[in-house]
Amino acid sequence: MLAGACALLPAARAQIPRPGAAYVRLLLPFPPGATSDVLARIVVERAATLLDEAIVIDHRPGAGGTIGTAEAARAAADGRTLLWGTVSNMAIAPALFPNPGYDPLAFVPIALLFGMPHVVTIHASHGVSTLQALVELARSRPGALSYASSGNGTISHLIGELFQRRTGTELLHVPYRSGPQGLPDHLSGRIDLRFDTLLDARPAVLGGKVRALAVTAAARSALLPDVPTMAEAGVADFVVTGWFAVYGPPGLPAEEAQRLAGMLLRVLRDDGVLEAVRPLGVEILAGGRHALAAHTHREVARWGDVIRSAGIKPG
């Protein structure tokens, strides 16, 4: 549903500049209108003025983000080509696909930009109002409660797998082709649970058809301020967000990475950026090179372990 926000944003500088003009190419391995596109356009509009040169968003979608990411891995390390990285193409796809064409840890970290928390929702007919009550219900009925995802190996699927591991429960995974496709079945009660983004879940929660039991962020969200975090709800060490970052190709010099990181962190301090992402249920993380390096290592290890231990294959 973030795609609908595109209509509210000014057009990004996606056209090729005049011949001979300098520009930075931001390889975005997801299609126009996707969440990454919406957020990248917000960043590009502000970053272009700070760089005093054009930034071109170059969409190269396909194969879980591996096509565009593999192209970025082959790009010249001169600061003219950057990669839009997410949990999908940097942490999940390398473990999901046997030969993705790149090593996520070989890219040069530049800046960690945004986080997108998820929320655990259950259909109101169950009469469950707390996360602990859900855990007790699931333990009493192994495999009976279903949860929807946007497909095998997607973040919503993996959050469900991690939830089962952390709570000692067994749920029935029902993959759909996309997140929105599974929402009607959740609203009707055919699907018991969802691990959804805050933005997509909020209308159903406010409408009373589903109950929000916990958010997966470290702190409560302004979109659903009465909903506790996973830790507050009794499940410790469960901070999970979709995330968005910028990387350079392997071999990008440290001084160039530092320059770009400084520029992007200035962008994130812009009031206009904050106002643009807040209604989308997105957090500004504003992590520099070293923070992104540590984050990438943690995410690659965490989701690789979940995928391998659960035997998850691409859908």
Image (tube, rainbow, N blue to C red):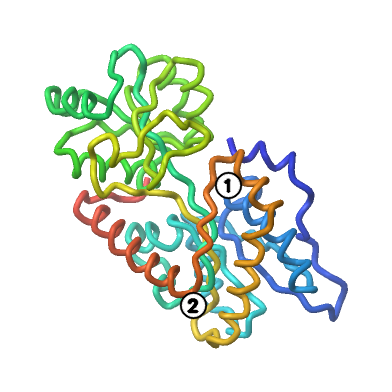
Q: Which residue is mark 2?
A: 108
Q: Quadrant of the N terminus?
A: top right
Q: Residue at x 41, y 20 (%)?
A: 210
Q: Quadrant of the C terminus?
A: top left
Closer to the camera in the image, 115 or 37: 115
Q: How many marks?
A: 2
Mark 2 Cα within 10 Å, few/some/many (few <14, many 20+)?
Answer: many
Closer to the camera in the image, 60 or 294: 294
Q: Residue 182: percent from the left, percent from the top? A: 44, 28
Q: Amino acid at mark 2?
A: Val
Q: Residue at x 43, y 69 (%)?
A: 291
Closer to the camera in the image, 233 or 101: 233
Q: Residue 115: percent from the left, percent from the top? A: 48, 52
Q: SS class of the residue under badge 1? A: helix
- Viewed as shown, does residue 269 lie left or right of 101? right
Checking the image for residue 35, the label placed there is: 1
Closer to the camera in the image, 239 or 5: 239
Checking the image for residue 244, the label placed there is: none
Q: Residue 62: percent from the left, percent from the top? A: 53, 55
Vertical side of 243 occupied by 148: above or below: above
Vertical side of 89 occupied by 128: above or below: above
Quadrant hosting residue 212: top left
Q: SS class of the residue under badge 2? A: strand
Vertical side of 106 occupied by 130: above or below: above
- Viewed as shown, does residue 134 lie left or right of 10? left
Q: Amino acid at mark 1?
A: Thr
Mark 1 Cα within 10 Å, few/some/many (few <14, many 20+)?
Answer: some
Farthest right residue?
18
